[in-house]
Amino acid sequence: MWKQRLGAAAFVGAVATSLLTACASGGGDTTGGSEGTATGTKTVDVAVLPTSNMAAVYLGVKEGFFEDEGLDLNLTTVGGGAEMIAGIQAGSFDFVAVGYVPLFAAAASGLPVRMIAANDVGGATEEEEWQAVVVGADSDIQSAADLEGATIGVNALKGVAEATIRASMQKQGLDDSTVQFVEVPFAEVPPAVANGTVDAGLTAEPFITQTLADGGRIVETPSLKLGKHFPNGVWATSQELVDADPELVDAFTRAITKSVEFASENPDAVREILPTFTALSPELAAAIRLPVFSADLDRSQLDTFIEILLTYEVIESAPDLDQMIRD
C-alpha cells in the first residue's frame, strides 16, 4: 500500500472535511460499478466531500447535465482523499472528487488512477483567494515577511499546507527555516490566532470570513504566490473503468466539465446551493469567498506542484502525469 501523509489533501486537495460538519449523501447502494436502470440511464457511484468546492457536481445534477448524458449519480459523502482512493481501488466508487496529493501518492505507488477534469483551483488575486494565512486583530504581523520566526498553525505537519507556505516564503526570499509549524485544524484557526496560541494560521472558508469578522486579517496567500489558479481539486476514476466502459467515462467527463463551467459562471447559483449540502447558513453562504471552479488540467502547474511536494517530502516519488491525464 502507498504511503500517504494524513491531511495532505486537505489544503490543496480540497477544503478540509473538518471545515463543514454536515454531510449530504445520495444514499442507496455504494457497492460501486455502473448499472442500467429501467429508464435506460446508468447509475454511477460518486464520492464527494461535504465542502463548498463540491458545489459544481450538485449544480450539475440540479441543472440536468448528468441526466442529459444518461447518468444517475449516487453521491456518497466520505471523510477524505484516502477513503476515496481506497474506494476506487475496491470498486466502490466510479468517480471521485479528490485532492491531488492522495491521487499522486496512489499513482506513484502503481495504482492505475486517471484524472479526467479539474474541479477547483486557487484564486488569481488576493481578493478571491479562498485559502490563506491569517492573523488575529492584535497581531503585529502585517505581511509574509513578518512570518519569519513565527509559529504557524497548519492542518497537518509535513503536509501540503506546510509545503506551500515554505515554498512561497522561499520564492519571496524569506527564511522558512525560522518558522515553527504546529498542528491546528482549520476550524480552530480563528480562535487560535485571536488568543495568541499561534502567531498565524493557514485556514480556508468559511473560517477566513470568520477571522475577518473578528478583526483579523490575511497576511499571506501561499497558493497564489506559487501561481494564479494553482491546482486544488480534481475528478478522477480508475483505469479499469476507462477500459471497461470508455463511453461512460466520456459521458461523465462531459457532464462534470459542463457542471464545473456552470459553477464558474454562476456564483449566485453556487451560493444558493451551498446550504443544501453543507452546514453553511444562507447568510454565511452569501458572505464567504467562493472556491474558484475550473475544469482545466494545467500541466505546467501540476509539474510545479509535484516538485514542491517532492521537495518537502509530502510524496515520496513523482507520478507519471502522461499516464494519469486522460485525453
Image: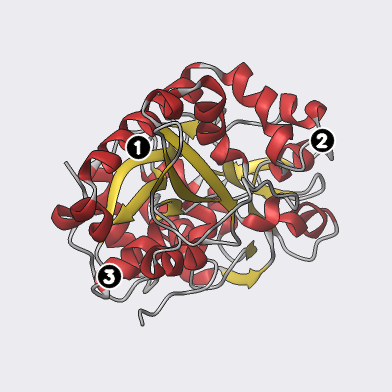
Look at the picture and state if 33 lies above or below 184: above
Residue pointed to by mark 1 = 252
The C terminus sits in image quarter: top left
* Res 175 seen here: no
Its colouring scheme is secondary structure
Q: CA distance from mark 3 to mark 1?
A: 21 Å
x and y, in percent, of residue 43 in the image? 45, 43
Q: For the residues carrying marks 2 and 3, which lies nearer the camera in this image?
A: 3
Instruction: State the residue at coordinates (59%, 70%).
Output: 181
x and y, in percent, of residue 21 in the image? 75, 53
Q: Which residue lies most toward the front here?
A: 38
x and y, in percent, of residue 129 in the image? 54, 35
Horizontal side, residue 130 vs residue 225: left or right: right
Instruction: State the residue at coordinates (59%, 59%).
Output: 78
Q: For the residues carrying marks 2 and 1, which lies nearer the camera in this image?
A: 1
Secondary-structure class at tag 3: loop
Look at the picture and state if 236 lies above or below 53: below
Towards the viewer: 111 or 303: 111
Between discs 2 and 1, the one toward the N terminus: 2
Q: CA distance from mark 2 to mark 1?
A: 40 Å
Between discs 3 and 1, the one toward the N terminus: 3
Q: What is the number of the mark on residue 213?
A: 2
Secondary-structure class at tag 2: helix
Horizontal side, residue 87 vs residue 112: left or right: right
Question: Which kind of residue does numbered mark 2 sit on?
Answer: Ala
Q: What is the number of the mark on residue 188?
A: none
- Residue 255 lies in quadrant: top left
Residue pointed to by mark 3 = 111
* Res 84 seen here: yes
